[in-house]
Image (cartoon, grey):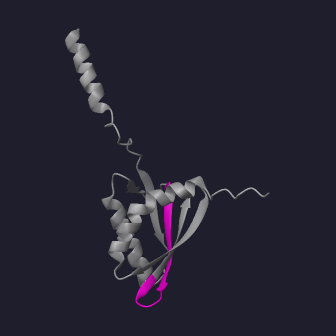
């Protein structure tokens, strides 16, 4: 009986998340869409973002064909910015809500796609929460 109690206590302690660390959040299914016929820059963004999201398997998984993704990232366009920078225009779609965004970036797409993948969960949570409430009128 004592051995069973000790074993149960060890199993319970091992299964509990460490103190001070939040419990891991679920994996979000995501789909990256790039309209056919868009410029090569937008197609490259789609490819690099998919690769970056696949590398973050603890947070995201690419939706399977025919599956409705919990989060859709649409790459709308990539246009020249000021100087040597470029601007990627996109839209986050989650739960029927769309949130357009622009990302101004210098240089290569890959590091920027990885940076977006790191921040995508936060952006998705903000989109899910909806726009901030307006201050009440006095």
Is 111 displayed left or right of 75 in the figure? Answer: left
Q: Given the current orientation, which residue lies at the most extreme left position?
A: 3
Q: Choose between 52 and 112: the one closer to the eye.
A: 112
Which residue is depicted at the point 78% across and 58% down? 137
Q: Given the current orientation, which residue lies at the most extreme right position?
A: 138
The segment highlighted magenta reads: 69-86
Which residue is depicted at the point 43% across and 91% down? 83
Q: Position of residue 124 (x, y in %)?
A: 50, 57
- Which quarter of the figure is the C terminus placed in? bottom right
Q: Position of residue 3 (x, y in %)?
A: 20, 13
- Place residue 6 in its image quadrant: top left
Name above or below for residue 138 compared with residue 40.
Answer: above
| Residue 54 highlighted magenta (yes or no) | no
Is 98 displayed left or right of 8 in the figure? Answer: right
Is 71 displayed left or right of 98 in the figure? Answer: left
Q: Given the current orientation, which residue lies at the most extreme top position?
A: 1
Which residue is depicted at the point 44% across and 52% down? 28
Name above or below for residue 78 compared with residue 135.
Answer: below
Q: Position of residue 51 (x, y in %)?
A: 33, 66
Which residue is depicted at the point 40% across and 89% down? 84
Q: Position of residue 76 (x, y in %)?
A: 52, 76
In this rendering, does residue 68 appear at all? no
- Which quarter of the figure is the N terminus placed in? top left
Q: Choose between 101 and 54: the one closer to the eye.
A: 101
């Amino acid at each position: 009986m004592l051995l069973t109690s000790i074993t149960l206590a060890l199993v319970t302690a091992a299964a509990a998340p460490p103190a001070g660390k939040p419990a891991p959040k679920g994996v979000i299914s995501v789909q990256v869409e790039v309209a056919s016929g868009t410029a090569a820059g937008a197609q490259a963004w789609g490819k690099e973002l998919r690769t970056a999201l696949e590398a973050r398997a603890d947070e995201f998984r690419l939706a399977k064909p025919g599956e409705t993704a919990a989060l859709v990232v649409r790459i709308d366009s990539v246009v020249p910015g000021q100087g040597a920078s470029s601007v990627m225009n996109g839209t986050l779609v989650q739960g029927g809500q769309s949130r357009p965004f622009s990302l101004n970036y210098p240089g290569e797409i890959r590091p920027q796609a990885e940076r977006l993948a790191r921040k995508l969960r936060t952006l998705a949570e903000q989109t899910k929460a909806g726009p901030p409430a307006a201050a009440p009128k006095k």
